[in-house]
Amino acid sequence: MSSSASPEIKALSHNRSLLLFWFARLTSIVGGQMMAVAVGWQIYALTNSPFYLGLVGLVHFLPMFLLTLIVGQTADRYERKKILGVCLFVQGVGVYILAAGSTGGWLTEEGILIIVFLSGAARAFEHPTGQAFMPLLVSRELLPRAIAWSTSFAQCAFIVGPALGGFLYLTGAVTAYTVIGSLFWVAGLFILSIRSPSSLSVRDVSGLQSHFAGIAFIRSKPEILGAISLDLVAVLLGGATALLPIYAREILFVGPGGLGILRSAPGLGALAMSIYLGRHPLRRKIGRTMFVAVLIFGAATVGFAVSTSFALSLGLLTILGGADVISVVIRQSLVQMRTPDAMRGRVSAVNSLFIGTSNQLGEFESGLTAAWFGVVPAVLIGGLGTIVVTLLWMRLFPALLRADTPGEFSSDQ
């Protein structure tokens, strides 16, 4: 495999448009993570209310939920590069407004929530459009490897972004927001510098049929529906990371420093696995591999639930993050390679909604079950539930279990 890997990696590394896309993705995710830290800190300082922290997550999720059908239609009707550029510049403007409000002292908690909502609306367009855009930049043969490397860049951003945001905020909200806004604009310039073929359009299709075409397409492809729904349910049930502050304080007794290390462990595992998949892409039996990865995710969650050892908990969270990335890469490869280009925007919009729903509701579900049953039972129930659902999905979606290569049933082009 190593002999065939080098030419493929060389081809990716010499793809100027793909590199610009990766740099834009890295820069925008770092900016988004920094913004989350700065906004969370500032709004809590203004209100001293955990409720407002919850509202930040809610107003960030609502645009994705409300705009899904419009987002998909837009990504398939208009040039995706321009959509991405506009989204990134809009987010930059929003952050500059936060900087101006912090400078003038007129920024209120309601004002922050409005900017977060508008930023969430821009991201609701950005994420599905980006997913649909990358297949235009790379050949079908190299797409699974490109997705794995793109995931590596994202994981780096998820690890580095929060730390940079916290460090910059120490110098003041204005400085932090100014840098964050500049990062979004730099990402937009990267995108607009890409030379790419125009995406296909669906101008000849109108009405409700076109808006709901992404949902209809996913329902017609059991392997894609199975992969997306399995990821949704697994993250919903296995949201152990939402309860990490309680584990750090009351079970592992490691304090805030230990909490930071615990939070980084899944990201480090995900980064290591995504780099491995970038060098050794999954080529066969991807369906079976995805089910095994989700089973490992559930088992690691169960182990973490009952662990009282800091070292063991770190190891289990690292395994959890690595298993999750395997599932993510396979799901993205299936969605992108088995969807015609003219449909990718709408299908990616539905996929993004599933991901956003699982992340947000997963945290809510973890908090709710912890309030009902206690912290350890809640995480244990989530891990066991993930295993049960995975075994059930193997029976409900045999097409996914039998899936061999990412693009074997694709009708693209």
Image (cartoon, rainbow, N blue to C red):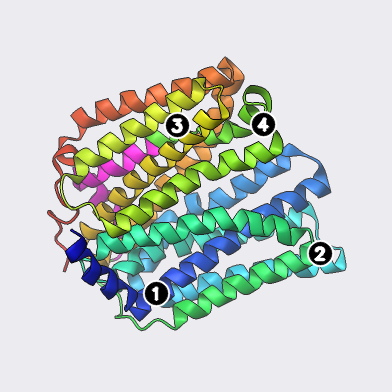
Q: Which mark is residue 102?
A: 2
Estimate how packed mark 4 is, as few (under 14), some (14 to 19) or many (20 or more) residues with alpha carbons within 10 Å. Answer: some
Q: Which mark is residue 254?
A: 4
Residue 96, image x, y percentages: 70, 71
User: Is there a contact, CB below 8 Å, between mark 4 and mark 2?
Assistant: no
Which residue range is magenta in the image? Answer: 206-233
User: What amino acid type is highlighted by mark number 3?
Assistant: Gly
Horizontal side of 234 relative to 199 (left or right) equals right
Estimate how packed mark 1 is, as few (under 14), some (14 to 19) or many (20 or more) residues with alpha carbons within 10 Å. Answer: some
Kindly indicate the quadrant of the structure image that contains residue 108. Answer: bottom right
Horizontal side of 93 relative to 390 (left or right) equals right
Estimate how packed mark 3 is, as few (under 14), some (14 to 19) or many (20 or more) residues with alpha carbons within 10 Å. Answer: many
Foreground of the two, 66 or 285 = 285
| Residue 80 in view here | no
Name the residue that disc number 1 marks: 19
Estimate how packed mark 2 is, as few (under 14), some (14 to 19) or many (20 or more) residues with alpha carbons within 10 Å. Answer: some
Q: Nearer the viewer, mark 3 or mark 4?
A: 4
- Pick whichever of labels 1 and 4 is earlier in the sequence: 1
Dot 4 falls on a residue whose secondary structure is: loop
Distance (Cα) linking label 1 and label 4? 40 Å
Q: Nearer the viewer, mark 3 or mark 1?
A: 1
Q: Nearer the viewer, mark 1 or mark 2?
A: 1
Q: Is residue 208 magenta?
A: yes
- Pick whichever of labels 4 and 2 is earlier in the sequence: 2
Q: Main secondary structure of the magenta part?
A: helix
Distance (Cα) linking label 4 and label 2? 34 Å
Foreground of the two, 135 or 252 = 252
Q: Which mark is residue 238?
A: 3
Marks counted in the figure total 4
Dot 1 falls on a residue whose secondary structure is: helix
Residue 208, image x, y percentages: 32, 57
